[in-house]
Amino acid sequence: MKLVLYGTAFCHLCEQAQALLAQLAIAAEHIDIVDDDAVLESYGTRIPVVKRMDDGSELGWPFDIEALRRFVA
């Protein structure tokens, strides 16, 4: 399963989301929302967001490690 983490540089919440992914040893492609106007418009006010590319479901902040674990199960 491929995961994407939508966020941006210098976002402390995005860093926390990345740390939770790391605690579970889950790899996710990081997409900086400022690099694409359409992505910025979609995610600009709700980052960080983890998206499952297999089914398109999204887990938006705030989430904890248990919610993340359930999301990827």
Image (cartoon, grey):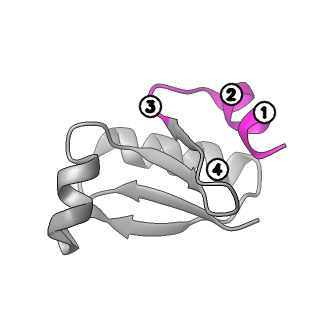
Decide which of tag 1 and tag 3 comes sooner along the chain. 3
Spatial CA distance of label 3 from label 2 is: 10 Å
Between 56 and 18, the residue placed more toward the observer is 56
Three-letter amino acid code at the position of disc 4: Leu
What is the x, y in percent for residue 27?
67, 65
Taking the image as shown, residue 65 lies to the left or right of residue 31, namely right
**Image vertical order of residue 27 relative to residue 66, above or below:** below
Crowdedness near tag 4: few (<14), some (14–19) or many (≥20) residues, C-alpha within 10 Å = some
Spatial CA distance of label 4 from label 1 is: 12 Å
Three-letter amino acid code at the position of disc 3: Trp
Which residue, given by chain and number where applicable, does mark 2 sit on? 67
Taking the spot 78% from the left edge, 33% from the top edge, the residue there is 70
At numbered mark 2, what does the secondary structure look like: helix, strand or loop?
helix
Between 37 and 69, the residue placed more toward the observer is 37
Which residue, given by chain and number where applicable, does mark 3 sit on? 61
Magenta-highlighted residues = 60-73
Residue 8, by quadrant, is bottom left
What is the x, y in percent for residue 51?
55, 53
Q: Do the residues labelled 2 and 1 touch (CB within 8 Å)?
A: yes
At numbered mark 1, what does the secondary structure look like: helix, strand or loop?
helix
